[in-house]
Image: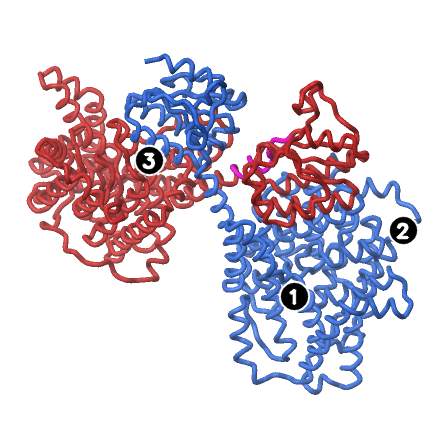
Chain colours: A blue, B red
């Protein structure tokens, strides 16, 4: 039990030199990749750049101890950073102490929620996020994030948490564009797109081996950071209005418990819950994909504990909400990480960078970071999924489109809430009118089939309705309506048989509906029977009054019901 | 189509003298019963007494035109009046013009919502209110209403919209009890309870015939009203501190459109939606029960239109939200109402009372009305349902208990929202871990059964998982987890077959999960097959990429899959 919560106790027993070398190499490459990402996502969240670095040290160590994926790399990610900006932006102004305090509190609450979900096995809550909703949400978030970074590319001030606000804000400032900044931003974007497609070919052509070329091609952002920093420093571009990162406090974050402020926690609770769910769903999906490649397994409930611990670690070390990132986990995997120890080594790398490298990135232009963000998030935008979903299912399409539109127009929180609500409503709707059919006896057999599709024997005074779905609150009323309509249209009927071979469950609402049907059919002079009730359902019905009140009988087989009632008056 | 929205055009064609006489007698009895009810429920809603009368005139005429139940009697009812008080009490102070304006607006919005639901066939929204939630909600509402009326019985001032607030408020004032009021209140309650049980026997013993005795026994509140009014008048009890109804404006309400105030409408929207749903569910259940007794039928969608029209009629004539009432509909039915015309005749009766009788009830004590409310609502309290539900289903019990507790402690709106949310969560939870089994071949047959329960043949390199539920977003992730666990624990497996005879639906989330399973099993070196996919599900899968990407095959029967793969490497 204890060991279950500390997966490190299992894998560390067999740790060996070969694993160490794989983990170390992966850690070096992930560190290089993570430095610009951490800075960029902190800015996206509206926080000082160093907070991104802080969020990439202790959280990684926590995941090494508590996580079950061998290769997941945690830290700040784009979508969660955007959600952080939206949540905290409602409560405080960017750049203030209150803003940072709220972001730290958000990580703390999110961590507590995740750990509680893990302990109480509430991972099922993540089931509410259907694939179309998550996919639509990420597409819309990607668009908002890209739009929000345009201000850094243009060198203007703009703000807003949804697409409309951002675009209006940019439009107001468009005359203030800073051209040196624009040149840096556009060049960086062009280079990053080029490097995605062609850098690997180039590296291969100059004789670098396949695996290394693969990895180097993914470190394009690092090249851009180095080159534009050097250019800004040598060309004194900040005097031309190019905004730079500037001073970053050198040194490790100090540890402190987040302020105990129940008012703030209440205000952040819903945001923290949404961030936890989205972060968990994304992270688990990455972890499962990578685990399957090596026929390993992750435990979703323990993953909640691992991510929760990471977020609490972020909160106590001055960071903001984190989760498992897709691209960095793939790099970690490809670079040969064998165990979660690679994460701890990465943490050491980031800590060293925080201690030593921060003076070197003084001249890093914000436009460069914005360019890396834009290129990263636009790859998340998948408008083609809309078409695929439309072809497959109109209901799922509606949920996806609603999520995208509400997210773009109203912001991330309302967007995801609208998507979740609509997919639940549509699901209940879909099961609220279950398939059912009037059936009759196929001559010469003991089988009963739909009277509309087959030539079958029926009797005027007997109606048999077969219902092909579990009966529960969403369809209980439908069943009542369906049966009353049948009875009022067939005045000769004396017996109604409900045939239940596909009913896996009858909940209390459906039970009351069956009792109401029984009582009302009695008033109408019709006897109500059941047939082919499954064993577990029958066991439950025996604990109710239905069987004693039933005007008719429960028949084991429909044929037995038919034989008994055909001769009855 | 046009006729569909005006049921009156159908039944009025065959209207005859016999129907007229039945409707007239019923209307007289319902009028007598409705006068004290209307006054009482207006006071419960925190409104002037005459508003209750106004809500019992035009709304009844509107239902006569648009309703489909032959015998439903609409007007103010207890639970909806309580919900009105809670909704409007958040926005304005009782006794002010703003309070009345808000109550009228609430009726209007509720009417619009109901009509839109009817036109767009959204009656399914009512399905979200499971039986345990409604039952728990009505029990808790009954308790709150009874508690809220105690102040009138005690002759003190007290307020609050949940049980706790009300009891604390009463406790503060308990020293101010007015004893003459208390005597009237207690006597009225005792008489009403006695009359429920024994008045009919007494009436029969003095030679009144069975049917008339039945009806008169239900008019106990009218006796109490008459006697206590006379006593207060003759004894000048108001000078002893007994609070009386006092002046009621004589005359019919003036017609006016509700104020167009989008702010107010937005604030009332959620309350109006909840009132609409609760009112509709209660009303339809009464209407269906009565219709079945005469083998008639109601149309739930048109009922929405009928109730919506009634609420709009209430709003334009200075009334508050109305719906179909249980006890008065039963009286209407028992008294021989044949058509909805009885409702229109009742409206005439109430209109005449408003014109002529209001001076006579000047001396009616408020304590008397409170007593009629208490006796009426305590009959709605059904704590036994808790026990019955506990025995039948723990999930449904949890939903019911939560609804009761939250309603009592936090008020009606949060109570019903908590109940609805919890029952949806519990339902998704229940279907999120569907029944599934590894199956093997029963020797000598072509049947496959659970390997844990039967002695069956299996092959080391083949696993067959049968899944007994439709696949959708709530269980898509469970399926992934289940399959990855199987594969990581069975390293010899080369083929995994998913057997789908009970899968009625695969939504887009489940489709993506199947695609992920296919891709990840491929990475693990396992071929993924499907068997016994139903026709409609297969048609949908053909519109996706799954079938082209599938590493294995889709077999029509599990036996065919077995035969093909058993010999494969």
Comparing labels 3 and 2, the label whose residue is closer to the camera: 2
Observer able to see residue A102? no
Q: Position of residue A42 (x, y in %)?
A: 68, 65
Question: What is the CA distance from the residue labelled 2 to the residue labelled 1?
Answer: 35 Å
Residue under label 2, please give it: A20
Q: Position of residue B12 (x, y in %)?
A: 15, 40
Residue under label 1, please give it: A378
- Which quadrant holds residue A81? bottom right
Magenta segment includes A217 = no
Cβ–Cβ under 8 Å for marks 3 and 2: no
* Label 3 SS: helix
Q: Which of A463 and B378 is in front in this view?
A: A463
* Label 1 SS: helix
Magenta segment includes B428 = yes
Alpha-carbon neighbours of circle 1 within 10 Å: few (<14), some, or many (≥20)?
A: some
Q: Do labels 1 and 3 share a chain?
A: no
* Start-end of magenta stretch: B427-436
Q: Which residue is drawn at 11% across and 41% down?
A: B349
Query: Which numbered disc, 2 or 1, marks the residue that appears first in the sequence?
Result: 2
Alpha-carbon neighbours of circle 2 within 10 Å: few (<14), some, or many (≥20)?
A: some
- Chain where mark 1 sits: A
- Which quadrant holds residue B499? top right
Observer able to see residue A89? yes
- The quadrant of the rendering that contains the N terminus of chain A is top right
């Amino acid at each position: 039990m204890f060991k279950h919560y500390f997966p490190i106790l299992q894998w560390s027993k067999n740790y060996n030199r070969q694993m160490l070398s794989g983990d170390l190499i992966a850690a070096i490459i992930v560190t290089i990749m993570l430095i610009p990402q951490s800075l960029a996502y902190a800015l996206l969240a509206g926080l000082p750049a160093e907070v991104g670095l802080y969020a990439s040290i202790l959280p990684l160590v926590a995941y090494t101890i508590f996580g079950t994926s061998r290769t997941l790399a945690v830290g700040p990610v784009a979508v969660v950073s955007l959600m952080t900006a939206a949540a905290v932006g409602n409560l405080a102004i960017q750049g203030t102490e209150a803003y940072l305090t709220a972001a730290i509190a958000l990580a703390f609450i999110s961590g507590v929620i995740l750990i509680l979900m893990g302990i109480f096995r509430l991972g099922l809550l993540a089931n509410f996020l259907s694939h179309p909703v998550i996919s639509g949400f990420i597409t819309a978030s990607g668009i908002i994030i890209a739009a929000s970074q345009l201000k850094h590319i243009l060198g203007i001030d703009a703000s807003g948490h949804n697409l409309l606000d951002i675009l209006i804000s940019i439009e107001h400032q468009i005359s203030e564009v800073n051209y040196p900044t624009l040149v840096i931003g556009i060049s960086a974007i062009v280079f990053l797109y080029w490097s995605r497609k062609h850098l690997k070919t180039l590296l291969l052509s100059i004789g670098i081996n396949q695996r290394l070329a693969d990895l180097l091609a993914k470190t394009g952002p690092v090249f851009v950071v180095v080159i534009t920093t050097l250019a800004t420093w040598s060309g004194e571009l900040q005097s031309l209005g190019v905004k730079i990162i500037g001073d970053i406090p050198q040194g490790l974050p100090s540890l402190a418990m987040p302020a105990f402020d129940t008012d703030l926690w209440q205000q952040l609770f819903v945001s923290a819950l949404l961030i936890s769910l989205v972060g968990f769903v994304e992270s688990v999906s990455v972890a499962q994909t990578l685990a399957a490649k090596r026929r390993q397994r992750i435990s979703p409930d323990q993953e909640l504990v691992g991510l929760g611990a990471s977020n609490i670690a972020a909160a106590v070390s001055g960071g903001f909400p984190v989760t498992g990132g897709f691209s960095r986990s793939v790099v970690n995997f490809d670079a040969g990480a064998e165990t979660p120890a690679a994460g701890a080594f990465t943490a050491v790398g980031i800590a060293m960078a925080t201690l030593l490298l921060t003076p070197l990135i003084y001249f890093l232009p914000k436009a460069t970071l914005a360019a890396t963000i834009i290129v990263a998030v636009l790859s998340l935008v998948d408008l083609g999924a809309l078409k695929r979903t439309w072809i497959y299912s109109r209901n799922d399409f509606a949920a996806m489109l609603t999520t995208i539109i509400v997210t773009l127009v109203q912001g991330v929180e309302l967007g995801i809430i609208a998507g979740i609500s609509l997919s639940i409503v549509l699901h209940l709707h879909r099961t609220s009118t279950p398939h059912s059919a009037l059936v009759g006896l196929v001559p010469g057999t003991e089988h009963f089939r739909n009277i509309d599709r087959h030539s079958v024997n029926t009797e005027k005074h007997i109606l048999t309705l077969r219902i092909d779905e579990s009966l529960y609150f969403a369809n209980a009323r439908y069943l009542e309506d369906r049966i009353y309509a049948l009875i009022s249209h067939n005045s000769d009927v004396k017996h109604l048989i409900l045939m239940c071979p596909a009913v896996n469950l009858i909940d209390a609402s459906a039970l009351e509906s069956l009792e109401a049907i029984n009582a009302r059919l009695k008033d109408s002079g019709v006897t109500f029977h059941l047939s082919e009730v499954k064993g577990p359902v029958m066991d439950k019905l025996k604990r109710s009054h239905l069987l004693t009140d039933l005007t008719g009988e429960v028949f084991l087989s429909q044929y037995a019901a038919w034989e008994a009632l055909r001769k009855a008056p």
